[in-house]
Amino acid sequence: MKCIYNLEGKNKAVVLFKFLAALLITYSHMKVLFPKYEGLVTGGAIGDALFFFCSGFTLFLGRKSNFANWYGRRVNRIYPSIIMWALLSALLFGWAWDVTDLLTTPRYWFIPCIMVYYAIFYVIREFLAEHLKAVFYVSLALITVASFFILDMSSSVMYAQVSFMRVYYFIFMLMGAITAVDLKKEQKERVFGFLQKGCGGGYLRPMVLFAVSLVLYYACMAVYKLGPFYCQFQMVSLLPLMLSIYYLFAVCSNEKLLKVFEKPVAGNIIYMVSSLALEIYLVQYAVFTDALNGIFPLNIPIVYLMIFAVAYVLKCLSNLFSLVFAGEDINIKSVCRI
């Protein structure tokens, strides 16, 4: 089997991150597939954090240009898929869309959120790139203080479906940006140098640190459910979640693990899912079904495959839309590329 990807100039760990993010975000929405075990459905906050980390990382590695061109490239990546999904979902699933839905995408909080953060990140990259450490800690402090004024800290709402939860993911975008910049610096000049130094030279130490951080995160989330008193301290969970994401990136950056891309089958699957992350996010709600719950847990991989298939069709339609409006030649290879 041939490799369908060319990762030259790309960070392979980020490709792995987007792959994991797509799987976790989808899994966290699969309650309908778990007839008796809804408690096993988790990982949404982790998947979202991974995806925002990737966005921040790639934003600080891309080429510079004026705001219109820079922002336009993000619009060109996201909105052809949204427009084509509006048409496809209306035809196949009876979903109703209007013009404002295309802009605000009420079913998908991630889209307007990331579009706002793109604009903010342009300002940071252009004018505050030399002060990322200050931007990170000031943002973290402001968000922490704001949480106590905006949220009801008597219940565990920090990562629940409330509008303010989106603000926390800005921190993970900043983490991604700082990590990308750190990779170009000497150890002593890195903002997260103290974390990177603790990872050592192999993958065992960051794997252990990731596991410990993840356990602490879930321990925090469990404790907050014990009562209102404990919920007052829910902001503490942000620290192990941030550490989990950073140490997982260290694990994914290990050369031994990255050899997976030398194996065409595994590499193709990871690259394809990673590249279709946006489309997977868009189509999953329409594909979820309880019709296969009788064969649980086999229904889970089957529904995953169904989502990937629909996401690929959407990607092809998105490519076609972009080619038509760009006035470029249309051919099968261009339409079907990932």
Image (cartoon, rainbow, N blue to C red):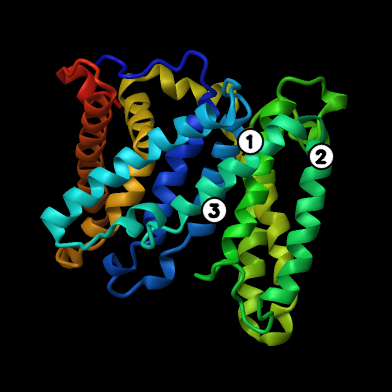
Q: Is residue 41 left or right of residue 62?
A: left
Q: Is residue 226 left or right of residue 328?
A: right
* Residue assigned mark 2: 133
Q: Mark 1, mark 3: which one is toward the viewer?
A: 1
The local secondary structure at tag 2 comes to helix
Above or below, 322 relative to 22: above
Q: Mark on residue 189?
A: none
Above or below, 335 relative to 42: above
Tell me which residue sits at (74%, 74%) in the image: 148
**In the image shown, does 37 or 281 lie closer to the viewer?**
281
Mark 1 neighbour class, 10 Å CA radius: few under 14, some 14 to 19, many 20 or more: many
Residue 241: tell me if it is visible: yes
**In the image shown, does 97 or 287 lie closer to the viewer?**
97
Q: Are marks 2 and 1 in contact (CB under 8 Å)?
A: no
Q: Mark 2, mark 1: which one is toward the viewer?
A: 1
N-terminal of the pair, mark 2 or mark 1, is 1
Amino acid residing under circle 2:
Lys
Q: CA distance from mark 1 to mark 3?
A: 25 Å
Q: Are marks 2 and 3 in contact (CB under 8 Å)?
A: no
The local secondary structure at tag 3 comes to helix
Residue 236, image x and y in percent? 74, 65
Q: Quadrant of residue 185?
A: top right
Q: CA distance from mark 2 to mark 3?
A: 23 Å
Amino acid residing under circle 3:
Ile
* Residue assigned mark 3: 46
Residue 192, image x and y in percent? 78, 36
Residue 247: tell me if it is visible: no
Q: The C terminus lies in which quarter of the figure?
A: top left
